[in-house]
Each structure stands twice: as structure tokens, then as C-alpha cells.
Image (spheres, rainbow, N blue to C red):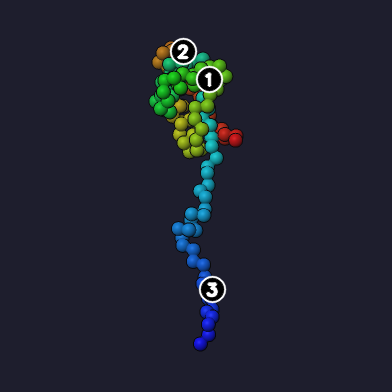
Amino acid sequence: MSDYSAAVAEPDVVTEEERCSDRKPKRQPPYHVILWDDTDHSYDYVISMMKRLFRMPIEKGYQVAKEVDKSGRAICMTTTLELAELKRDQIHAFGKDERLDRCKGSMTATIEPARG
């Protein structure tokens, strides 16, 4: 009988849970929803649209209206491509500004990649 014991190497067993936890989920690149200025929509229209489509408080909607009026464009939201496309389409479908007789339809919005 010997006084030593032999170590036996056992294979590493990696569970599926451990394997999956090592993988980081891929993040989708962000996109901006851009609202473009025109002369056929009032501040009240923009504020109302921001409140309804983006759930912005009135004060934030006013800031967007001011920015689009001053700069010609304003970023309404930065999100995934799919949601940005939806929000752009919702802006296009929002309808005309009933406060202005000359208004013929919705405002213009586009999406663009957000540069980091």
C-alpha cells in the first residue's frame, strides 16, 4: 500500500448557463429622430405632437418647438432603428395643424445614425 494518492484530471464541465453568461448582448446602433422646421405649423402643434407621440411634458415639447424654430431641426428621440422608423412615421401621420389655415399636412421628420 502506498502513502501517496494520484490526482486525476477531470474534464472542465461548462454548463449552458455559464456559456451564455460569457456572451454580451450586441447593442443596436442608436438613431436620431429629427423633426424639420417649416412655416406651416405652430408651437402648440409641435408641443401637442411631442406630448402625444413621445410622452414629453409640455415644457420639454416647448423646448423642441423652440429648437426646431431656431435651428431648423430638432432631435426628438435617440433610439433603435426600428423605433426611430416608427416615430418618424407617426410624425408623418400626425395630421395638419388645425390652428393654421395654410397648413396642408404633417411635419417632416427623418432618421439618421447617432454619431458617438
In the rendered image, which residue does mark 1 sit on? Answer: 68
Mark 3 crowdedness (10 Å alpha carbons): few <14, some 14-19, many ≥20: few
Q: Residues within 10 Å of mark 1 (few under 14, many from 20)?
A: many
Mark toward the viewer: 3 or 2: 3
Label 3 vs 2, first from the N-terminus: 3
Judging by the rendered image, the residue that carries numbered circle 3 is: 9
Q: Which comes before the other along the chain, label 3 or label 1? A: 3
Residue name at image x 49 percent, y 66 percent = 13
Q: Which amino acid type is marked by label 1?
A: Val
**Which amino acid, by three-letter code, is at mark 3?**
Ala
Q: Is residue 95 visible?
A: no
Q: Which residue is mark 2?
A: 102
Residue 4, picture quadrant = bottom right
Between disc 3 and disc 1, the foreground one is 3
| Residue 107 drawn at (x, y percent) | 48, 22
Asked whether the residues under the numbered discs 2 and 1 touch, taking CB atoms below 8 Å apart as contact, a structural biologist would say no
In the displayed structure, would residue 75 be above or below residue 19? above
Find residue 71 and report its image quarter.
top right
How far apart are the two marked residues, 3 and 2, measured between alpha carbons? 82 Å
Which kind of residue does numbered mark 2 sit on? Arg
